[in-house]
Image (cartoon, grey):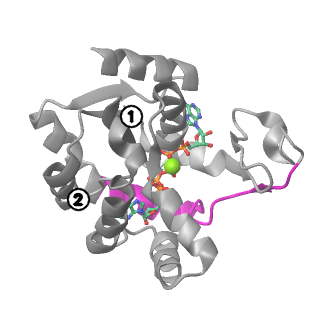
Amino acid sequence: MGRYVMLGMPGAGKGTQSRKLSQEMEIPHISTGDMFREAVKSGSPLGIRAREIMTAGELVPDEIVLEIVKERLSRPDVSRGYILDGFPRTVSQARELDSFQAPDAVIYLALSQEEAARRLEGRRSCGKCGAQLNIYLQESAEDSCPKCGGELVRREDDTPETVRVRIETYIRQTKPLTEYYREKGLLREIDGARGIGSVFENIIRSVKK
Ligand code: AP5
Ligand code: MG
């Protein structure tokens, strides 16, 4: 049970930790980035617009994001809580969230820009089984998926130029949320540079406090 926001720069480990926390707590993992990537795949008008914005490293306009998040948070499985990954991303999105389903805690994964860029450079996912990998963690993931042998793909926005813009966008528009939530006493700062298991243990410890 609980309503959690996962905050951190691109590559900080939001998706990785959200998936673990979602399993542990049995509450839905809601990633706005994943929702937009699904829309891109479907080729819908929203997908066509989102793709352009995402590959430029910029943010989808607040009105569009809010519409899909409000719809998602109105579904019955959210009654036990949620893990929001990649939302809110602007102070105005955070204010909106407060007005309908305010979070209980905000998990902030702190990481340097250099390490974040390195992780994104090494990120791969399996086109067949969907496994999320990193060539710096699983060396065998250079060629094919170590789990099923499927072909590995890179995210379209993980090019060096787009990563640079995404990090800048984060610093300008999303980082101010750390102060927003600190002032409310909700921020739980976690050292995101540790190993995946150790980061997760620290998250569990901080939310149980
Ligand atoms: P989104 O999908 O949210 O991307 P992001 O914020 O840039 O973050 P990433 O998904 O790249 O990183 P992550 O923190 O999830 O790290 P991960 O766990 O994968 O958003 C994409 C785009 O959609 C945005 O740019 C924007 O255009 C749009 N958008 C989305 N939400 C929006 C919103 N609310 N408003 C407006 N626009 C929105 O880990 C990265 C890699 O590192 C992986 O390979 C992983 O295996 C590895 N790794 C993870 N943890 C560790 C560790 N502890 N040690 C070593 N390696 C690790
Ligand atoms: Mg992610």
Q: State how far apart marks 1 and 2 are (Cα).
A: 19 Å
Viewer-proximal residue among 205 and 69: 69
What x and y, as percent, mark residue 147?
83, 38
What x and y, as percent, mark residue 58?
39, 69
Mark 2 C-beta to ligand 1 under 8 Å:
yes
Residue 12 shows up from this direction = no
Look at mark 2 in the image and give the residue it sits on. 93
Where 208 falls versus 178 (above or below)?
above
Q: Secondary structure at mark 1?
A: strand
x 54%, y 37%: residue: 19
- The kind of residue tagged 2 is Gln
Where 176 falls versus 68 (above or below)?
above
Asked if the stretch drawn in magenta spans residue 167, the answer is: yes
x 44%, y 30%: residue: 192
- The kind of residue tagged 1 is Leu
Q: Earlier in the sequence, mark 1 or mark 2?
A: 2
Instruction: Give the number of the mark in front: 1 or 2.
Output: 2
Q: Furthest residue to the left?
A: 183
Where 198 falls versus 99 (above or below)?
above
Mark 1 C-beta to ligand 1 under 8 Å:
yes
Highlighted range, magenta:
150-172
Asked if the stretch drawn in magenta spans residue 151, the answer is: yes
What x and y, as percent, mark residue 131?
72, 44
Q: Is residue 75 left or right of residue 62?
A: right
